[in-house]
Image: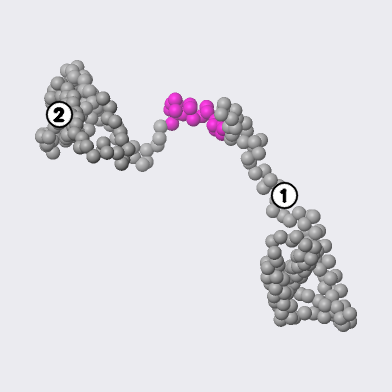
């Protein structure tokens, strides 16, 4: 019978209730557990060390010699007898004496080696080739474009005619410009800026560009009115003009000003 639940302020809650203790069933234990534990110990104890714990230490006198593991054929009496006869024969033969310095060499003896020397000509040198595919296709190296044939030309390493002509024209134009500048300077129509004046003008141009750039950085990001847009465009045009002037003064070291 299920327990009846009453409200918290009910009178029935004052009656003491008996607590029923539930007993858990005993945990299941397999009857094969001891045999499994024993089997695991037997298989695991053998793997605790790398090999058996006690190993016979090899003796330093029994080291591995060269060709000791190669198969050897059994020695026969016939082979030993032939080797002995060959050694005795070669040792008993007497070599001819060394010819004296005054002895003339034998003439008229025609051997096979002399025939090879006289009959064969100089060997042909192989043609240099290059292989350009993985199938083995090859062609002569001279026609492959890898040989620098241009270094064998007569005019190799010389300056081309069009470059000489261009250099001559540039030199002539420079001389004419220098002559014109000299004439204008002599007439007093042009004035040459010194290096100090050029550096001073360059520094003033850069300082003016820095001021405009600082003012440009302080503009608002949103140009929602015509005045803001016009002011921004005016600053950009002025900065661009200053950049061109700075590049002009940095590019040319010699600057002339007209007196007009």
How much space separates mark 1 and mark 2, taking CA atoms? 94 Å
Label 2: few (<14), some or many (≥20) within 10 Å?
few
Label 1: few (<14), some or many (≥20) within 10 Å?
few
Query: Between 42 and 113, which is closer to the camera in this rendering?
Result: 42
Q: In which quarter of the image is the C terminus?
A: bottom right
Residue 80: x percent and y percent?
A: 19, 21
Count of number-bearing discs: 2
- For label 2, the residue is 41
Could you say whether the residue bearing mark 1 is in a helix, strand or loop?
Answer: loop
Q: Does the magenta stretch include residue 108?
A: yes
Residue 73 in the image: above or below residue 188: above
Could you say whether the residue bearing mark 2 is in a helix, strand or loop?
Answer: helix
Query: Between 241 and 17, which is closer to the camera in this rendering?
Result: 17
| Magenta-drawn segment | 107-127
Q: Which of marks 1 and 2 is nearer the N terminus?
A: 2
Query: Between 209 and 98, which is closer to the camera in this rendering?
Result: 209
Residue 137: x percent and y percent?
A: 59, 28
Residue 12: x percent and y percent?
A: 26, 36
Residue drawn where x is 81% and y is 76% of the image: 256
Residue drawn where x is 74% and y is 61% of the image: 223
Q: Does the magenta stretch include residue 176?
A: no
The answer to whether residue 134 is visible is yes
Residue 108 in the image: above or below residue 16: above
- For label 1, the residue is 154
């Amino acid at each position: 019978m299920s327990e009846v639940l009453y409200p918290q302020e009910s009178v029935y809650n004052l009656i003491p209730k008996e607590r029923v203790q539930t007993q858990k069933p005993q945990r299941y234990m397999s009857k094969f557990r001891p045999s499994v534990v024993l089997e695991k110990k037997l298989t695991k104890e053998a793997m605790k060390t790398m090999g058996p714990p006690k190993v016979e230490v090899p003796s330093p006198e029994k080291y591995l010699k060269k060709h000791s593991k190669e198969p050897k054929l059994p020695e026969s009496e016939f082979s030993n007898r032939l080797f002995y006869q060959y050694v005795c024969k070669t040792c008993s033969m007497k070599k001819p004496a060394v010819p004296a310095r005054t002895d003339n060499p034998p003439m008229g003896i025609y051997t096979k080696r002399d025939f090879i020397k006289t009959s064969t000509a100089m060997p042909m040198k192989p043609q240099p080739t290059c292989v350009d595919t993985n199938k083995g296709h090859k062609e002569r190296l001279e026609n492959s474009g890898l040989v620098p044939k241009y270094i064998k030309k007569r005019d190799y390493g010389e300056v081309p005619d069009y470059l000489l002509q261009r250099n001559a024209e540039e030199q002539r134009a420079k001389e004419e410009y220098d002559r014109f500048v000299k004439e204008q300077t002599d007439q007093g129509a042009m004035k040459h800026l010194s290096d100090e004046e050029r550096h001073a003008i360059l520094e003033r141009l850069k300082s003016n560009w820095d001021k405009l750039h600082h003012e440009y950085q302080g503009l608002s990001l949103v140009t929602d009115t015509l005045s803001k847009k016009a002011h921004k465009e005016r600053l950009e045009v002025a900065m661009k003009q200053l950049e061109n002037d700075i590049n002009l003064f940095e590019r040319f070291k010699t600057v002339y000003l007209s007196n007009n």
